[in-house]
Amino acid sequence: MLFSSSIFLFIFLPAVLLGYYLLRGQRARNLLLLGASLLFYAWGEPVYVFLMLFSICANYLLGRGIDARRGGGRKTLLILAVVLNLGLLFVFKYLDFTIENLNALLGLQIPPVELSLPIGISFFTFQALSYCIDVYRGTAEVQRNILDLGLYISFFPQLIAGPIVRYNSVAEQIRRRTVDAEGFQQGVMRFILGFAKKILLANNLSVAAERAFTLAGAGELSTAMAWLGSLSYSLQIYFDFSGYSDMAIGLGRMFGFRFEENFNYPYISRSVSEFWKRWHISLGRWFRDYIYFPLGGSRVGKGKLLRNLFAVWLFTGIWHGAAWQFIVWGLMYGVLVAFEKLSGIPGRLRTKAGKGLYATLTLLIVNAGWVLFGAQSFDAALCQLGAMLGLGAAGAADPARFLFSESWVFLVAGAVLATPLIPRALRKLTAGREDRPLVAVGRAALYLLLLALSVSFLAMGSHNPFIYFTF
Amino acid sequence: MKKLFSLRNLTALCFLLFLAVFFLLSLKPFLRESYYAIRAGGDTALAESRFNDFLPGKEGWVTLNGGVQRLLGRREVNQRYRLENGQMTYIIPELDMEPIAQNTVDFARALEERDIPFLYVNLLFKVDEQDKQLPPGVEDFSNENADRFLAILRREGVDCLDLRELERAEGLDHYSLFFPSDHHWTPETGLWASARIAAALAEREPSLAADLSLMDPANYDRDVREGIFLGSHGRRVGEWYIGADDLSILTPRFETRLRFSVPELELVREGSFAETMLFPEKLEQTDRMHSAAYDVYTGGEYGLLRVENLLGGNGKRLLVLQDSFSLVIIPFFSLGYERVDYLDLRLWDGDLLAYVDETQPDAVLVLYNPGALEDNNTVMFDFFR
């Protein structure tokens, strides 16, 4: 089930909220949330809910085992947990990619397994791994209640598109949490904001982006269409992904959870390194805590630093999808971050013009990166990047002008809303006046308008892509 | 949560009220559509899609959305395009016509072996080949597809009637032949097409000649119902975007006595044109998202519809393969013949040639519009099942 569906909004969410607030006691509420989460997952993937249950049971037993043992046995169980979780991910996500490459490399003819990818598997396996590692490190207490661990791994708000919640950041909240009216309202506002970002902006921007990717695949892309497509996709993926995160964070707050932020206006970054501190923050932190730091982080020699960086970025690329374009995309960021770390740029730039130029360059690189990320194939990505550099070859009819006339409003709105300008202005405007009737009514009217407009797009059955199937 | 009921938390309260109202209104359609999906052997996607179709306040939501899209000046909404003249259409990509043309040729040959005349009639598509009215950069290939399709049929000696040629020859205003909010043509156009098809049939087979005065607009009364029809495009984009269309109810001034039967529904109506061909209750329906006033003619689409002229017509029996465009052809065209069987291959699953052998029609016609042409043998061109 997707948040951006009428069944979620009109049936699932009200039913779960009603049940949650009718029940008394954390245990009953957790049980309800676990049941709802499994139903949420089973709605679109009835078979793979058993995979989820297996993951919960196996990680529960491994966690208990790690906690109970000392010495070598403890490490063996941790290795087993890593192998099991990554093994699941490998079988469902990377096995066919591996077979395809082995066939190409060694001239073999191994048939592909063609397993469909369980939705959200990259998110929940990383969460399960985080639990086992945290228990091993002693940074979190073992979870003795399998139902509570099940809730952590399968909790529906962050199940299919993150944020990746590390166990030690929510362990206490699973045991004990409270919801106050203020927190609930914050959750509602955050959910509506994310819902609107996804449906009003991301979905409408996706039309031009997808058209450009299709034309690039056919080798019929003009320079104008290539740019329109790439800029639309850059904004689409931001509003889609951050919209999902906003919805997850908002839903979490409605049930008393506080998840960490996942996005922080990444397109205002002044460097590539800064971009990755603002984009998909939970994934960056996961890799930092569970790969980069254990390898020695940056407090090592240059050679090891490069190794550590490339390991993280290789995994980042692979995590996003089983295709070479994701690996190249990840490694591209590895090179850029290594360059910035070793050269001290942009910190060493003294002039405003230099810093501004570097920030612009960062945006252009990120934009080109998204072409690589979203294209139908590596060749199609090169075609689109070539077209952006003026090597385009439009087909009989170039749709750029029409699609721009259709989507310029969303492009402009997206560009403005990708910066903190409006939230800052609103905060300034309402600072100290939150309790005034006019502010309360105005705020409610604004959020209801966003909700109504978003629902109107849902009701229309308009284009509503889910772009995390490869994750 | 005791402090929830304060003005400060108005946003949360409104949201909860919104959820509560829509939850209560949605429960019934959700349970009904989920049950339907399960019974139909479908999955959750089917349940979801059907629930979305019956969302509480669906027309209101679509209307609101259409208003916003109109304000934004958008010309593509929900895969429908607004033409320069304000009408709506969908577009068709360039397709390979060879497979369906070959199947049509084979079908014509099979009828030839049975000594049954065959006529393929190419109806009109919303987009005019010579005046497309589409936004710049948007292409429609429906007419080009039809040109290539008809060229193959003619090359193979299959008899064709292209209504586009007659339309041009008569200098008709193409877009006035269609409903602005729909891809279908108006009843007036259906009446015009009926007369042209009957005339073409008579020209080819004089023994099939029908009394063309039965299809002459001068012999019909016209009752215009203003703003009553929200077409299929209109249902996707909302009335605030495209507006609702007028619908004419045409009734003959001459005597008629017909039998209208739909075997699958065990429906048999006998009486005058108005008593058999018209379903006035279709004009009264308030749920415009799931009903169309256009269905006032014949009541809707059926797998097999048989119309018998109890006054005898010209004594000839025809078999017509058709789709929804014929809803406004059937009432008028049928008047000229003794009996016409109308098959819609999307809804009828019998053996077509066995049916031909069983009913022995005096001629077989296919009435399809260019929008029905596909690049493989989809059900409408599956003549040999």
Image: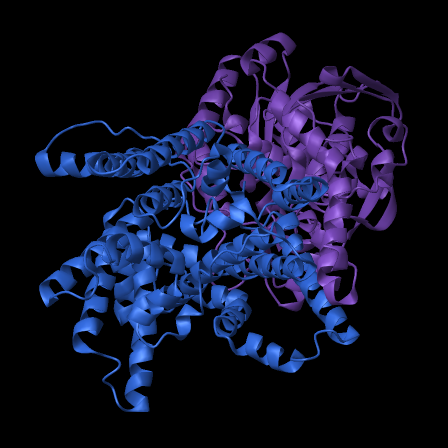
Specify the colour of chain A: blue
Find residue B76 and report its image quarter: bottom right
Q: What residue is at 45 percent from the left and 40 percent from the top?
A: A153
Q: Is B179 or A110 nearer to us in this picture?
A: A110
Residue B237 in the image, given as x and y percentages of width and height = 66, 53
> How many marks on residues?
0
Q: Is A340 or A233 nearer to us in this picture?
A: A340
Left or right of A289 in this view: B107: right
Q: Is residue B375 above or below residue A344?
A: above
Q: Is B379 or A449 nearer to us in this picture?
A: A449
Outermost residue toward the top in this view: B358
Residue A227 in the image, given as x and y percentages of width and height = 37, 68
Report whether residue A164 is seen.
no
Residue A350 in the image, given as x and y percentages of width and height = 26, 90
Left or right of A76 in this view: B44: right
Residue A320 in the image, given as x and y percentages of width and height = 33, 50
Q: What residue is at 57 percent from the left and 33 percent from the top?
A: A35
Left or right of A209 in this view: B381: right
Specify the colour of chain B: purple
